[in-house]
Amino acid sequence: MGGRVLSVASECVPLVKTGGLADVVGALPGALAGKGWEMRVLLPAYRSLRAQAAGWPVVFEEPDLWGGTGRVLAGKVAGLSVLLLDAPHLYDREGGPYSSPVGEHPDNAIRFAALSWVAARIAREGLADWKPDVLHAHDWQAGLAPAYLAYHGAGGVKSVLTIHNIAFQGWAPAHMLGILRLPAHAFHSEALEYYGGISSLKAGLVTADWITTVSPSYAAEILRPEFGMGLEGVLAARGPVVSGILNGVDTALWSPEAADPPFSAKSLTGKAKARENLCAEFGLDVPGPLAIVVSRLTDQKGIDLLPKVIPDFVLGGGGLIVLGSGDPAMEGAMRGLAARFPGRVAVRIGYDEALSHRLFAGADAVLVPSRFEPCGLTQMYGLRFGTLPVVSLVGGLADTVIGASPATLAAGTATGVTFHPVDALAFRQAMAKLLELSRQPKLWAKLRQNAMAHPVGWEVSAADYAGLYERLTA
Ligand code: ADP
Ligand code: GLC
């Protein structure tokens, strides 16, 4: 059958990215096109995007967008059909999508309510030549879109809300209820009310026709208090309409064949050369496995465990390159590790897409010791490049990596190293196992082959999304 989907999010590759959300929002339209679903992506026209959209036609207008006008501009970027919500009073600012150089924008609740409001209007009313069948909202920033459909009329459109990270909930104080154009009758604990205020994510969870999250394991985990971050009860109440659909990665963008130099599972010479180049670039001389971390440096990602684990790994012959930014204390701790182990540990604080590609191509292992991980993409990049993932057994990490154990090694199925619980002891043991495997060339080669053969593309999950849209619109 097929149809049309309006995807609404705050980030989308290649336009604007702070994390995996952008990768997924940017990859879905291409993955769904082959399944008969035409997806357009609505994003705020942040300052960094306005020049690009200069000549684009205006396809929709909202005169009353919280203190100014909103105009929706339509265009194509790298094959994607993009709708940019141009509302300079809300989005034409210095900084990233959520913050300026001095901190979070104080009006984020309104900035993303505006995005959701326009999304709901486009879904309900359609553009001149395009009316969606489904509105697909991502994370709290688009959480009010299903709520606006529910409370202001849906016009026959079905809504899906995908949770990429339940830790971010978009909270606003109760007095903003009317300002956010939400009805007073919905201000109670079974609907919008959350800790005395309003949560955009909760609003979406109680009103969307369907809820997905980005891995089957995370879908089960968020029903429990350790992972639900206060919303476990809401999710349990909506149990029948919650499902987990595993993220894929863009296998053309993340491809060993496209690396410099290129390589493949059959011919790994290019990978060895990429490793040499990395070591030269970072001044490293590493006899054992070269590990990488490419990550936001936050509590979620378990980065604080590295200083307790890496010293033993280095003494055992390993090396580490960290690329990331985030918590200043963690940035400092990473710099401290590099200072303590010159020639073995290097750190690059910042965000660097090109370097991240070189790291995945040249390294031997990628470390993802997350406390929780809705899906995680870097372990999948690791699999793709034969860079063995060492991951904690949570969320999407548990769904994508087959840990080396006597059983999986005997069966020849292991693709990495997994550990549980998420603490320094278990992580240290996992790194010891990695060292031990690296000293057995045949086993190591087999692990690498398995990793590179593991499917990480969008094929299966795109079919799942398409199936979901079909069921909702049938
Ligand atoms: P999350 O979205 O929680 O940060 P994911 O693993 O889903 O985690 O996605 C993170 C994405 O951001 C990946 O594409 C990863 O390569 C990228 N990334 C994270 N930190 C950096 C960095 N410092 N430089 C370049 N890319 C980064
Ligand atoms: C979130 C999650 C991450 C997931 C990404 C894309 O940022 O933290 O686990 O991979 O969204 O869905």
Image: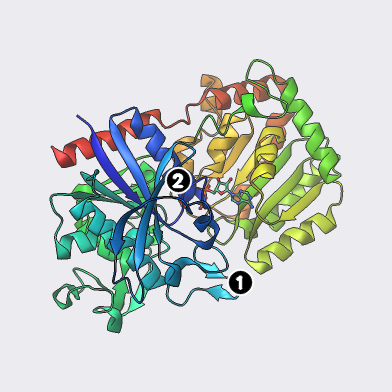
Left or right position of 216 against 350: left
- Residue 199 bears which disc, if any? none
Relative to 457, does residue 281 appear above or below in the rendering? below
Alpha-carbon neighbours of circle 1 within 10 Å: few (<14), some, or many (≥20)? few
Could you say where residue 420 lies in the image, as x and y percent from the top left?
Answer: 52, 47
Q: In x, y percent, where is residue 189? A: 21, 73
Asked if disc 2 is less than 8 Å from ligand 2, the answer is yes
To which residue does mark 2 refer? 375
Q: Considering the image in quadrants, where does the N terminus appear?
A: top left
Q: How many marks?
A: 2
Res 247 visible: no
Vertical order, 289 against 220 (above or below): above
Name the residue tied to disc 1: 101
Which residue occupies the extreme top position in the image?
266
Between 15 and 253, the one lying in front of the other is 15
Q: Residue at x 46, y 47 (%)?
A: 394
Residue 433's spot in the image, x, y percent? 66, 37
Q: Secondary structure at mark 1?
A: loop
Residue most toward the bottom? 175
**Given the image, on which type of amino acid does mark 1 rest?**
Pro
Distance of label 2 from label 1 (alpha carbons) = 29 Å
Front residue (pair 340, 311): 340
Identity of the residue drawn at 67% across and 33% down: 361
